[in-house]
Image (cartoon, helix red, strand yellow):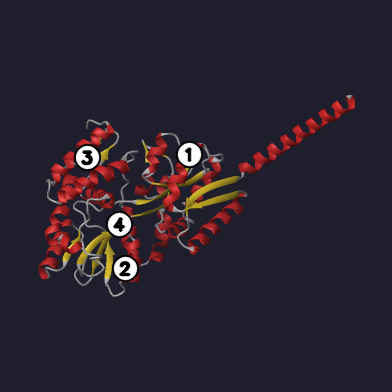
Amino acid sequence: MIRRVTGTAAGVALLIGLTACGSGSDKAAEAKTLTYWMFQDRTPQAGEVVEKLRTDFEKANGVTVKIVKIPKDDYNTKLGSAIASGSVPDAGILDQPLVARYALDGTIKELPAGTVDEKAYYEGALNTNRVNDKLYGLPVDHTAVALFYNKKFVPTPPKTWDELKQIATKIHQDDPKTAGMVVPKGDGYGAWMWPGIVAGAGGSLVDEKSKKILFDQQPGVDALQLWVDLLPSSPRKITDSDKAFENGLAGMMISGPWDVANIKDQFPDLQFSTAPLPYKTQPAGNIGGENGVVFSKGKNADLAWKWLAYLTDATNNTQLAQALGGFPTNIAAAERDAATFGPDQAAFLEQLKVAQARPSLPQWIQINDEIIAPAIETALSGKATSQQALSDAAAKTRALLGWTG
């Protein structure tokens, strides 16, 4: 009996010892393992780029990087479930408008001071990670819209709003069946582009520090009125037809770099090019793209930040951004590799130098889609003046945010 008890005790002691050893080993391995979530590869070639970046990082640092790739349409849903269950990865991609929400509720961590040189990044791209003057991520890639123009109608692209209106008017006067420009609509996409126009008049959408709505002030009104003023030379009855610009029924349109390849593939005879957005007082544009963030409940924050810094440094950022379908956010990478993007993409690279981040408000997507977009359409349809439409939108936004300014 005594011997059995002794044997049992010894066995328990051995088990405890083995368990303890296993825990130490597991923890050591865990400390060297990083889990990273990102969107599904766009192409097999893009997957090869990501794989090389991963293996090079592993070799250089003696760690393991587990990359989980999720279809973009499912990403936010799966991430939301992971956050709710506390099973988040160490780091992952995040849509720009979600940074503010997750920063303010503590889901993602603040970037430790000294992790990167902030001056190495385009200001607009970096600011998509800034909430209350603190950075909560790094911009992995970014994109913007620019002016597409048909060389048949527009030998030299306009640089200013006045030139834009003059050219649009001439195109329609020369041929009433051709529109000067495809004017954006009052939908979520149009509202996403509109801040770049407002910034081109020297304006901003909000002042977050003083909690003031600014998009109903003169620069915003002028920006919306520009689109209203273009409509007589750019009738909807023409531009509402399928692919009006691509079919040669409109001289200009605003769109993103994704349409360059689409047009060349589907409309090879169309002679077009791209240029930075015309402006009133200063060059400016909007911005989109993805950021890399570190989750508060992840296990290896230091390693996660090191990985994100690696993905966005001057050496690696161009190849990753191209794999993701965007442009580098690292200035040195963009300047060094500008020629690799081709002449049709040069306008977007220029545009991103002056791109401005959207307001870092958790409610911004709702404001964009449910308040500003309808206001734009109200003015474009003639149901209200630009000032009236934006004043009403500003009042709704103040009510939503609880602001008084």
Q: Element at badge 3?
A: loop
Residue at the limit of the structure toward the bottom, as seen here: 269
Camera-side residue of 132 and 401: 401
Mark sitting earlier along the chain (2/1): 1
Alpha-carbon span between mark 2 and mark 4: 15 Å
Q: Which mark is residue 263?
A: 2
Of residue 67 and residue 121, the one placed in the foreground of this image is 67
Check the image and report above or below for 93 versus 250: above
Report the mark closest to the observer, 2 or 1: 1
Dots 2, 4 in contact, CB < 8 A = no
Q: Residue furthest front?
A: 1
Amino acid type, residue under disc 3 in the picture: Leu
Residue tagged 4? 145
Chain-order first, disc 2 or disc 4: 4
Q: Are marks 1 and 4 in contact (CB under 8 Å)?
A: no
In whole angstroms, how far apart are the C-alphas of marks 2 and 1?
A: 40 Å
* 157 relative to 119, above or below: below
How many other residues sit within 10 Å of disc 2, few (<14), some (14-19) or many (≥20)?
A: some
